[in-house]
Image (cartoon, helix red, strand yellow):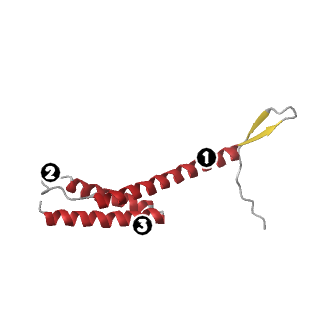
Amino acid sequence: MTAETAQTLIESLDDLLEEERKSLLDGDLDAIGRLLSRKEALIDALNAPTLAGQPNLTHLQGKVIRNQALLDGALEGIRKVATRMAAFRKIRKTLETYDQSGRKTTIQGEVECKVERRA
């Protein structure tokens, strides 16, 4: 692989990392998933043993670290939402109260959702 080809790969990866950053900031998880295979292919091509000399990739390292931090934040947000949704489901199914002596009592119940039509 020529140095020119390596530079093209580096520029493509740089553009992809910027696109990934934009998708992360926009919350577009579908786009992030679609970019993953392209990202892996570019990284594999750059890691190929036929690459003439090792290109300097340090300028991309900062972008990769930045995007990883954004991705970690997005995943943490998704986990928090999932936990919150689970709490809401639990609240809808049970009622927890305390009696006069401070003991917790749980009342099980199902929320029945129905619509009544009136003329």
What residue sits right under mark 2 in the picture?
49
Task: Decide which of 4, 110 is in the foreground and name it.
Answer: 4
What residue sits right under mark 3 in the picture?
22
Left or right, 88 with reference to 100: left
Numbered tag placed on residue 86 in the rendering = 1
Kindly identify the residue that appears in the image at 44 percent across and 54 percent down. 69
Left or right, 48 with reference to 87: left
Kindly identify the residue that appears in the image at 70 percent across and 44 percent down. 110
Kindly identify the residue that appears in the image at 25 percent across and 55 percent down. 43
On the image, which quarter does residue 30 sit in?
Answer: bottom left
Q: In which quarter of the image is the N terminus?
A: bottom left
Image location (x, y in percent) of residue 108: 73, 38
Look at label 2 and name its amino acid.
Pro
Image location (x, y in percent) of residue 117: 75, 63
**With respect to residue 22, does 99 lie above or below?**
above
On the image, which quarter does residue 97 sit in?
Answer: top right
